Structure formats: structure tokens, C-alpha cells
Amino acid sequence: MSAPREQFGSRIGFILAAAGSAVGIGNMVGFPVAATKNGGGAFLLIYAIFVLMVCLPVMLAEMSVGRRTKKDPFGAYKTLAPNEPHWAVSGWLAVLTPFMIGIFYTVITVWLLGYLVKIIAGDLTLLAQPETFGSFINSTDIFIYMALVAGIVFLILQGGVREGIEKAAKILMPSLFIMLLALVVFVLTLDNAFAGVQYYLIPDFSKITGAVVNAALSQAFFSLSLGMGILITYGSYLGNNNPIPSSAKLVALTDTSVAFVAGLMVLPAIFSFNPNTNTADLSDSSIGLIFSFLPKIFLALQASIGYTGASAVAAIFFLLVFFAAITSLVSIIEVPNAAIMDSTGLSRKKSLGFLGLILGTLTILASTSFGMFDWTTSFTSYAGQSKSVFDVIIDVFYETILPLNGLLICIFVIYRWKKANLNKELETGDDNYKGSIFERYVNFSVGTFIPVILFLVFVNTVALKYFGYNFIG
């Protein structure tokens, strides 16, 4: 007889944990710059529409499958579609995807911790030098920080759902919100800061193209942790008395709010540093902005608040992003961990040990693919470009498989599990959902245009990433 399924101790614990999985590095840096470079307020509007009209119904589908089966993604597909190998493959993909995403996310989290430690040690001037990042990621120091990150994540996950994931979310997420708001208030006091606010918020509809619309959808889909199996897994830890529809709305609102407020921190800081900023010159990469550009901005603050003050602001920012990364990393790794426990019956500690061994080995390989080893740096090539191990993981699993997983869950829920079962699960614990306009919309959207949108995103991603052809202009 199997042990009772772990559950979140409270609704707020689930919401904070799910929001923690959604709030990550992309929210803190990638979203503000994507909005600024793609029409400002117009991008925000398109993003919000996609969150409400596309992402929220997919969230409901994933959470309902998880709570109904009380299983990880692989177990959920097997439970609802027994003896159907094609759906078992979908479940396997939904577990493999977060496992592989966990590799590159760990690498970035290691860099964040390293920069945070160096800022606290008084090395902000060094970090602002353009060559520092390249030398840091190819130094042996990263393996020390990797061990520290692994230890933090292991301690949180070892505590289980209630004493580990939920308790950490209740500490880290409010801390993140408080630090973010404090930094926004400070940044808005800087000279020329409101030029950044203006650029960020005033819509420029002339910049809206098919590519921008696609970027907004991708940002919304990835930001909310859809297609990673996280919401299926977290849904499996949710009691029947906790309403899924309203909880999902709060998770989406929290994630979008953090991304929006982060923009009120990042863009004003950039414009304060350089009033003549040309946003076209800003890096599309969150990594480039965090580790190469922002340290220079923080160092520039020493003219007004001194070197110690500038270092303190930089430390708070990197601690903020580190917290966001840790909450996301915990949720990412919990998916394959739950699958191992469910499939093998191993204890949480043994499962984490086994998972950590494999994940750690692959993370080391990915972390050496920036010039440390030639074979990991020039691992393969496609679309006329050389690709490292790190690049391949991002291209295949983060960029390509995520929308495919979202497409598969929509098809599965409506055409295999059936609409009636979806409605029944979503109505459980939420009397207001039954017969509502929202229920009818979810049924219609998940079964019609959302799969079409996700299919087009998947096809365009494959064409662009692997063949160098973009269908969307």
C-alpha cells in the first residue's frame, strides 16, 4: 500500500509555491526589456491578453490533471490513458523537459550566487569590467558555487511539500516582493528615471509585428511555467477543497505583477545611467543584461550614494534575482523527483540523491561549454551555427519542447480525458465555476484555437532554430 500523497498545507502556500515556479529570471530582466524593445505598453497589453486568453486555460488543464490523478506528469498520463503508449510518451516528455531545463537553470543560478558573493566582498568594480563575466564562468570557482546551490535546493526539497517547498515559498516569495518594491522606490528617485518609465509604459503600436506578437505569447507561456509538468506536479499536491480556477488566476496575476513591477525597476535604472539610451542596443539576452550590463549601472550609482551604497543596491538586486531563480529551480527539479518517487517507490532522500547525481554530472558538462572544454563548447551545429551543450539544451527543451508539451496537454484533456471530466475536476471546490462564462470559455479555447496557436509556435520554432527560416515576420 502506497503512502498518502503529500499535500500543501494551505491555499496561500500552494499559490506562493506555484507563483515561485513562475517568477524567475525572465520576469526580473527579460520581460522588462522585451516589453521596451517591442512597443512598450502595446507589448504589455498583448502579453496580458495572452496570459488571460491562452495561458490561464492551459494552467487549469495542467492543474486539474495533476489533482485528479495525484501523480507526476508521467504517472498522470498513464493513469488517465492506461495501455496507450503514445500518451505515455507525452508523460515522459513532460518529465524529461523540466529535468533538462533544470540543467541550464542551475548554471545560471550558480552565476547569480557567484556574483552576489563577489558584490558582498566588495568586487563591484571588478564585475563592471566587460571581461569579468567570461573569465568568471570559465573559472573553477563555479564548482564551489554549484555545490552551494545544490545544497540549498536539496535542503528545500528534502523537507517535502509542506515543510520544504511550501515553507521556502512562504519565506522567499514575500521577501522577493518586499525587496523588489524597495528597489523600485529607490530607482524612481534617481535622475531621469521617469524617462525610463515613460518609454516602458507608453504604447508604440508601430512596433507591433507578427514576430512581436509571437514574442509576447512565448514570454507569457514560458513565464507561467507551462509545459514543464510543474503545474501537474503541484496540482497533485492540492486538496480537493482548494479551488483550482481562482488559485490559477492568483498565480497568473502574481507572476504578471512581478514582471510588470520589475520593469519599473530595470528600465528607469538604465535610463538614469544613460539618458540617451537606445533600447535597440539593449541585449535580448537576460544573461547579457544581468551579468554584463547591470553591474555597470550599479557602479555608476556611486556618484550619488557612494561605493558602499552602490554595492548594497547591487547586492539586493542579485539577491532578489537569486531568490527568484531558487524558487523556480526547486519547482523544476521537483517534477522529475516526484516521477522517480512515484515510479520506483524510493524515499524522497534517496530519489533526490539519485537525481542529483545525474543532474549534477550533466550540469557540470553544461557549465564547461563556454570555452572551458572544446568538445562541450563546440558540441554540434545546425542552422549554420555552432552550438554548445548549453545552447542545445535551451534550443531543444526550453524553446522547442515546451510549446509541444502545452499542445499535447490540451489535446489530451479535451479529446482523451474529455471535457466533462475536466469540468468536473475544476468545479470541485469551486461552486462558482460551474456553468460560468469562464467555464464555457475554457472548454472552447482549450479544444479549438489554443492548440492551433501552440502548434504554430512549435512549427515556427523548429523552422527558425534548426533550419534558419522564420514563418513569422
Image (cartoon, helix red, strand yellow):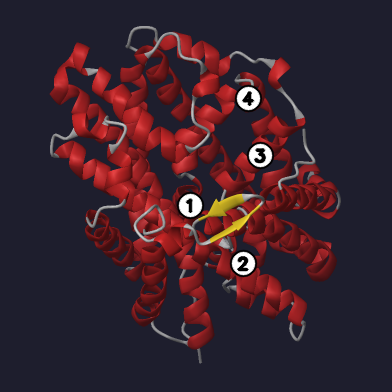
Q: Which residue is mark 1?
A: 21
Sooner in the amino-acid sequence: mark 2 or mark 1: 1
Q: Find the distance from the CA under tag 2 to the CA under tag 3.
A: 21 Å
Residue 38's disc number: 4
Q: Is residue 230 left or right of residue 315?
A: right
Q: Find the distance from the CA under tag 4 to the CA under tag 3.
A: 17 Å
Q: Find the distance from the CA under tag 1 to the CA under tag 4.
A: 25 Å
Q: Indicate the amino acid at tag 4.
A: Asn
Sooner in the amino-acid sequence: mark 1 or mark 4: 1
Regarding mark 3 in the picture, which secondary structure is present there? Answer: helix
Q: Is residue 469 left or right of residue 138?
A: right
Sooner in the amino-acid sequence: mark 4 or mark 2: 4
Regarding mark 2 in the picture, which secondary structure is present there? Answer: helix
Nearest to viewer (mark 4 / mark 3): 4
Count neighbours of disc 3 (C-alpha within 10 A) and say few if under 14, some if 14 to 19, many if 20 or more. many
Q: Is residue 66 left or right of residue 283?
A: right
Count neighbours of disc 4 (C-alpha within 10 A) and say few if under 14, some if 14 to 19, many if 20 or more. many
Q: Indicate the amino acid at tag 1.
A: Ser
Nearest to the observer: residue 126 or residue 11 = 126
The quadrant in which residue 90 appears is bottom right
Q: Which residue is mark 3?
A: 51
Residue 94's disc number: 2
Sooner in the amino-acid sequence: mark 4 or mark 3: 4
| Residue that protrudes farthest toward the bottom in the picture | 1
Residue at 56% across, 69% down = 96
Q: Indicate the amino acid at tag 3.
A: Val
Dots 3, 1 in contact, CB < 8 A = no
Nearest to the observer: residue 99 or residue 464 = 464
